[in-house]
Amino acid sequence: FIGTLSFGMDITDRKKAEQEIQFKGKLLDAAADSILVHDLSGRIVYANRNAEELRGYTSGCLIGKDLHNISTQEYAQMLNERIEEINHKGEVIFESAHYRSDGSSFSIEVHALLIERDGEKLILRIGRDITERKKAEHQIRERMKELRAFFSLAEITEREGLSLEELYQELVNV
């Protein structure tokens, strides 16, 4: 007897699982924040699209990089302490600064969480570029210095019996 042997496997569950993974990947890439996952030595194992774009890298180029090398020198020196703190506390929020691929740097606020995958401890970092906020804070500090100087000057003029108009005229005529 000559015949054909055939068999089939139901791959519905596997297909559903693959679709779910793809869906979750799209959600992470749609996030407005930078999302990085790294091991306890600082080696990056996952980066979403925003993490790559913010740092000027193309798709997949951050994977395998050491976080020590993309952090500015000031923050790279603190990285091992931060990792220990996250490992101990489980969750930490802090500021850092990273380099872009072109060598420029930016400030970032990081919310870091200790997670686990297949028994391995990893750190999930959700970061937001705060460069503009830092610039605005700097401008506010500068304006506050100017206001303090102005009020000190006003105090002196009052004590000396000068009006602000008289002081202004003295300064203009110098």
Image: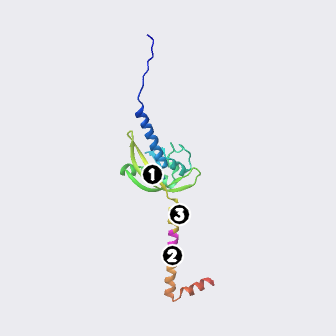
The answer to whether residue 143 is magenta is yes
Q: Dot 2, crowdedness within 10 Å: few (<14), some or many (≥20)?
A: few
Q: Which residue is mark 1?
A: 126
From the viewer's side, name the closer residue of 5 and 143. Answer: 5
Q: Dot 3, crowdedness within 10 Å: few (<14), some or many (≥20)?
A: few
**Residue 95, horizontal then vertical, whole percent:** 46, 57
Residue 44 appears in the figure = no
Most common SS among magenta residues? helix
Q: Are marks 1 and 2 in contact (CB under 8 Å)?
A: no
Measure the C-alpha gap from mark 3 to mark 2.
Answer: 18 Å
Residue drawn at point x = 53 percent, y = 56 percent: 106
Q: Residue furthest top?
A: 1
Q: Tell me, for residue 135, which label it has, or none.
A: 3
Q: Which residue is mark 2?
A: 147
Give the residue type that dot 2 points to.
Leu
Q: Tell me, for residue 151, which label it has, or none.
A: none
Measure the C-alpha gap from mark 3 to mark 1.
Answer: 21 Å
Give the residue type that dot 1 points to.
Ile
Residue drawn at point x = 41 percent, y = 44 percent: 122
Q: Where is the C terminus found, in terms of image quarters?
A: bottom right
Q: What is the span of residues highlighted in magenta in the rendered image?
A: 140-147
**Residue 151, horizontal then vertical, whole percent:** 49, 79
